[in-house]
Image: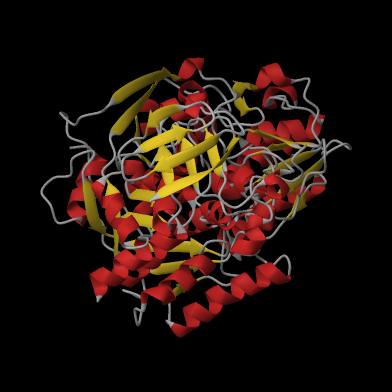
Amino acid sequence: MILKGRVWRFGDDVDTDAIIPARYLNTHDPAELAKHVMEDADKEFPNKVRTGDFLVAGKNFGCGSSREHAPIAIKAAGIHAVIAKSFARIFYRNSFNIGLPIFESSEASEKIREGDMIEIDAGSGVIRDLTRGEDYRVEAIPPFMQELIAAGGLIGWTKKKLH
Amino acid sequence: MTITEKILAAHSGKPEAVPGELINARVDLILANDITAPIAIEEFKKIGAKDVFDRERVVFVPDHFAPQKDIKAAEQCRMLKEFSREHRLSLYFEVGRMGVEHALLPEQGLVVPGDLVIGADSHTCTYGALGAFATGVGSTDVAAAMATGECWFKVPESMKFIYYGTRNKWVGGKDLILHTIGDIGVDGALYRAMEFDGEAIRNLPMYGRLTMCNMAIEAGGKSGIVVPDAVTEAYARGRAKRPYTSYGSDPDARYVEIREYDCATIPLTVSCPHLPSNTKPAAELADVAIDQVVVGSCTNGRLEDLREAAAVIRGKKVNPNVRMIVIPATQQIYRDAMKEGLLEIFIDAEAVVSTPTCGPCLGGYMGILAKGEKALATTNRNFIGRMGHPGSEVYLSNPAVAAASAVLGRIAVPEEVCEE
């Protein structure tokens, strides 16, 4: 799987209230949630983001609540993947469970700039910054997580196990 | 092994659980609310399982936007009710019987020592106060567990926090945990189990332990936990709905880090905007004028919390510039607070008393902030926009500091309004 697109940058400790404010949680419709993605971090973001874009952030991305609406909103907004120095644990779980690709890379998190064009080869674990002409390595995805991805998320994995 | 490793081993049928290892464990209880259950219900249907694994171990509590705040919230709440009816769930709590989930479950004896509990709510970690392993997960995890009765976990490393000495006057579990988060940061315990110990924890009543474990997630923790003792036993006895096992940590248990705190040096503590780790002594914030005070939530909405706030505000009035909202966390707390005369004290002080709900804590309703407004709340998060407009601010404190601040219209410590 090779993903290519433009980067939007955010800082450390981006919380789930910033990703999708609780005032919009009276619905769980992905399209509705996508209209407000990252709104409290950047009010204009829902209008600026395009299908195929990437989010690049600092440490502890997705901290705070367990709301699955957060990775759902990101995915429904058409964002290919999130790259961060580290992820909060419930957000990490949720992303694999619902099939939002996320990658941990300190180097990429520090060096990639807003507006850069990047390309991720999930198979080889390399992020290529096409704007800067640099390559960064991502942390290997644990085998169990790869199993989840291959099954299309936790529901597919559970179905396989039960039937 | 640590208590956490023992509980995880016991629930995965293994003699031992080693940090870093992936396990599939049996869950004792599964929880979801009106925000997270709708997604769990839809995902559950996709699995194609005929029924839930055990109709007496799936708990649905409409508490976040309930009593139903608008049409969309009502539609979500209805999904919980219909699913509960269809699958004959014995633990669906309708408005009138419900409470804020993490106050309700321990109070009703539904969580017991030694349990493994998952909830589609990050503050599920609250139940560690009872010596249970409890952690927040997403809706899809809940859906899968509803079908299988199991959940996957990476066994966390444990981090030990030891509190020595005697707490200063008015200093409670909230101050201890805010101080700790201020020390280690919002990812200071990322992926780890936070085990609270020491003489000050042994002397801390259950409500204070629940407050501390509740906020483990605010340090990135997977769980918070206190090894059961006489306090736990007294709380669980006569309340526990199931037989239980009390686990302890072995003397040679391994901790990735041990941190020690002298309670004499822990002041009344406030988290300033916009992270729980941005802590300052309450006494240093006297120039922060506030517009709203909230006493309630899964963190500090228990009867003892209301008693502390009432002790401070008794016979006084809420400052004319402030609206004060008191939210008993469950129906039982509401009734007990009424019988004790606490609600009268709040109403005499010109505060409002609400029915149990998460409401304003997450910016749902019942006390939303306008642009530029500041609130002091006994809740758990002060992220940007948490309680309303992205241009508003939330400060976090214990109930006594909240009550004193309501009287003076600015952040204050109880000594400023109490003669004793």
Horizontal arrangement in the rendering, residue B81 relative to residue B401 (left or right): left
Q: Nearer the viewer, residue B284 or A125?
A: A125
> Which residue: 60% across, 76% down?
B78
Please, is residue B58 above or below residue B396 in the view? below
Residue B241 visible to the viewer: no
Horizontal arrangement in the rendering, residue B202 relative to residue B300 (left or right): left
Give the colouring mode of the picture.
Answer: secondary structure
x, y (%) of residue B11?
Answer: 21, 56
Horizontal arrangement in the rendering, residue A35 relative to residue A113 (left or right): right
Q: Nearer the viewer, residue B306 or B110?
A: B110
Please, is residue B211 above or below residue A134 in the view? below
Horizontal arrangement in the rendering, residue B96 relative to residue B215 (left or right): right
x, y (%) of residue B39?
Answer: 51, 66
Which residue appears farthest toward the right when viewing the image? Answer: B320
> Quarter holding the C terminus of chain A?
bottom left
Residue B282: image quadrant is top right
Residue B330: image quadrant is bottom right
x, y (%) of residue B67?
Answer: 67, 66
Q: Nearer the viewer, residue A100 or B277?
A: A100
x, y (%) of residue A113?
Answer: 57, 28
Please, is residue A27 above or below residue B306 in the view? below
How many numbered marks appear? 0
Residue B199 visible to the viewer: yes
